[in-house]
Image (cartoon, grey):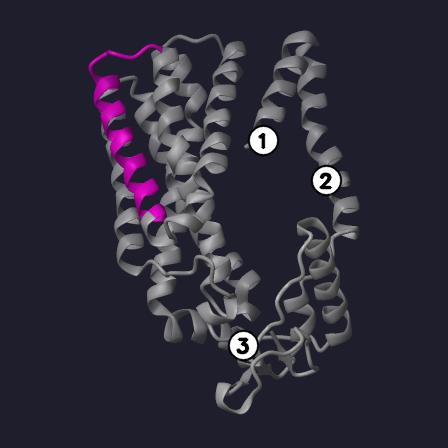
Amino acid sequence: WGGALIGTAATLFFLNKLSADLGWRLAFLIGPVLGLVIIYVRRNLPESPRWQIMHGREAEAEAGIAQIEGEVEASTGSQLEPVSDDKAIEIRPTEKISYVALLHALFKQYPGRSTLTAALMITQSFLYNAIFFTYAQVLTTFFHVPNGHTAYYYLAFAGGNLAGALLLGPLFDILGRRLMISATYLIAAVLLAVSAVAFDRGLLSAGTQTICWTAVFFFASAGASSAYLTVSEIFPIELRAQAIAVFFALAQGFGALGPAVYGGFVASKKPHELMLGYFLGAGVMAVGGVVAAIFGVKAERTSLEDVASPLTLVRKASSASTGATASPRLSPASTH
């Protein structure tokens, strides 16, 4: 959403200060330029020690861990406590996890977690696509905002999304995943329903409608962001990237319905029909909140290996046969 703020500001400049033929072309060039920046960032981004140890690159993993520990000790001015040997697990490094193993883990081993992540991803994708891609249409159709001015309202919308993620984000570790995910989804649903009634009764202007949406997505953005992170932390570590890909693709399939459905509501030019559309979005988000309350996983302040055992796990260390403490080192077939 920080990127959305920058992109919207750039769009305002290019489209309002330059000719239409040139402005939109230069605006489109922002994407490729940022893509080139990412190439540089990616080349300097260290690999995850977990990924390295899973692929048998224990020396590199050990070096990465040592570097992280050194930076933490230097910044805090205190020495880290040794990791107890009873935290060790033994894994068998593997280069690739088959699709059969992926499907077995997602839908056989963890069906409740798959239900949770599918619900979170699908519901937030539907709501965001529905509102975001019809935002300008609503402003121009019902509030008669000139086409060239809709970007100003996007600034407020993007700012609310960014603020929600930044301000509410720490609470997901403090108060817990289940409570915060379900709360953000349900609060967003209630606020959207209330604003829909106000819209239908003609109580809102373009400005107050934007304030209402900003409030809705202040909470929805934190919940939606947590949906992606939930996928990455509640399945075995070997499947984190693949699980995100599976549920993201699934969510986008349903999310594509949002603009189509809401486009029809907007095209009707009837506030009452659009209100029903907003009720639909509120109901969808409420479903996500209820599913989170039922199937939510306590993953806050917990090691990923404790949230879900690795697929390549051979055994866990026995606390009875180990010493009190040990240096936090990675052996070729184990990780701390």
Which comes before the other along the chain, label 2 or label 3? 2
Q: What residue sits right under mark 2 in the picture?
A: 35
Residue 214: image location, x then y, percent = 40, 25
Q: Is residue 231 above or below residue 327?
A: above
- The foreground one among 132 and 53 is 53
Q: Which residues are magenta?
A: 180-205
- The foreground one among 171 and 189 is 171
Which secondary structure lies at badge 3?
helix
Mark 1 Cα shell of 10 Å, populated few (<14), some (14-19), many (≥20): few
- The foreground one among 66 and 121 is 66
Alpha carbon of mark 3 to alpha carbon of mark 1: how far?
A: 39 Å
What main secondary structure does the magenta stretch of the protein show?
helix
Alpha carbon of mark 2 to alpha carbon of mark 3: how far?
A: 40 Å
Q: What residue sits right under mark 1 in the picture?
A: 2
Q: Nearer the viewer, mark 2 or mark 1?
A: 1
Q: Is residue 273 left or right of residue 56?
A: left
Q: What residue sits right under mark 3 in the picture?
A: 87
Q: Nearer the viewer, mark 3 or mark 1?
A: 3
Callout 2 amino acid: Gly
Q: Is residue 70 above or below residue 14?
A: below
Q: Quadrant of the C terminus?
A: bottom right
